[in-house]
Image (cartoon, helix red, strand yellow):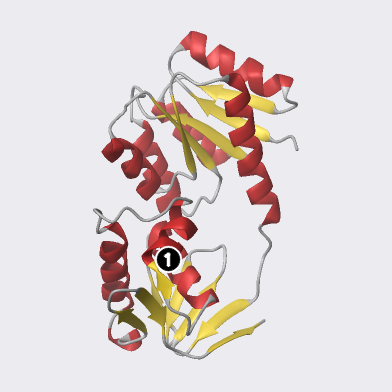
Amino acid sequence: MAGRILVVEDTPELRAMICSVLARDGHSVETAADGVTGLARASSREFDALVLDIGLPGIDGLELLEQLRAHGSRVPILLLTSRSAVADRVAGLDAGADDYLAKPFAPQELNARVRALLRRRALERPRAEMICGPLRVEPGTLRVWINDEEKRLTRREYELLLLLMRRAGEVLSRDDLSVGLWGRPHDPSSNTIDVHVRNLRQKLGRGARGSIKTVRGVGYKLAVTTGARG
C-alpha cells in the first residue's frame, strides 16, 4: 500500500536516505528540513503519513506534533528519535504520535512501520454518532458533547473516551487501555492511565459525573447505556 508521505528531518544525509527508502517502496515523498516548514506543509496539504524527527530547528518535533493535533489533524505520525530516555518516547506518544522509531534504524523496519500506519489509516471509516447516556461523540472528529454542550478534549483523552464507550459496561484493565492507546502493556510503575482518566473526568464535568467508574484493583468502566444514531 503506497501513500503520500511527508518527511521532516533536518540532517540532509538521513533525509535523503529516508526519501530513497520510502520511494523504493512505492510512496510519493515530500520533505521539510525544519519544524516551521514541516508544520506549514503538514497543515496546508493532505498526507497519508508523516515521518517526523524530534530534534528539529525552528520548532522541535514535539511542538509540531502538538500543534497538528490541537488543530484536529489525524494524520498518522511516525516519530524518529535518537534519544534513549523512556520519558522522551512517552512524551511523543502522549503528544499524539502513533509510533516511534529509534535511530539508527534498518530501512526494512522504517518501511514496515510506515506500511502499518497506512493500513491502520485505511481501516478507519466514518461512523455514526456514538451515544452513551449524556455523552455524544463523532468518531474521527475529536468532537464530544455532554447534554448538547460541546467539550474540548485532547486527542489522547478523546481516544480514551472512545475505548470506554465502545465497550460500555465492561471493565477495562489498565493493560486494556494502555494497549488500546499506545499499543503496549501497562507499566505497573506508571500512573499515566490514572492521570488520563482523572483529566477526562474533569473535562467532562458534572454532566457526566459518575459515568466513568473505578473498579478497584482492576481498572475502569463506562457505566451507562450505549447506543448510536446517524
Q: Position of residue 111 (x, y in %)?
A: 63, 28
Res. 46 visible in picture = no
Secondary structure beneath label 1 = helix
Q: Which residue is more in the foreground, 57 or 225? A: 225
Residue located 43% across and 78% down the image: 171
Q: Which residue is more in the foreground, 36 or 164? A: 164
Categorize mark 1 by other alpha carbons within 10 Å: few (<14), some (14-19), many (20+).
Answer: some
Residue placed under numbered mark 1 in the picture: 160
**Which residue reaches farthest top?**
13
Q: Residue 220 vs residue 226: left or right?
A: left
Q: Position of residue 1 (x, y in %)?
A: 75, 38
Residue located 24% across and 59% down the image: 191
Residue located 42% across and 23% down the image: 34
The disc labelled 1 sits on which kind of residue?
Answer: Leu
Q: Position of residue 211 (x, y in %)?
A: 37, 85
Q: Residue 27 vs residue 105: left or right?
A: right
In terms of image quadrants, where is residue 209?
A: bottom left
Q: Which residue is more in the foreground, 193 or 5? A: 193
Residue located 44% across and 13% down the image: 11
Q: Quick one: quadrant of the C terminus?
A: bottom right
In terms of image quadrants, where is residue 17?
A: top right
Using the image, determine if residue 223 lies above or below residue 10. below
Res. 102 visible in picture = yes
Q: Position of residue 106 (x, y in %)?
A: 55, 20
Q: Which residue is more in the foreground, 175 or 147? A: 175
Using the image, determine if residue 137 lies above or below residue 84. below
In terms of image quadrants, where is residue 139?
A: bottom right
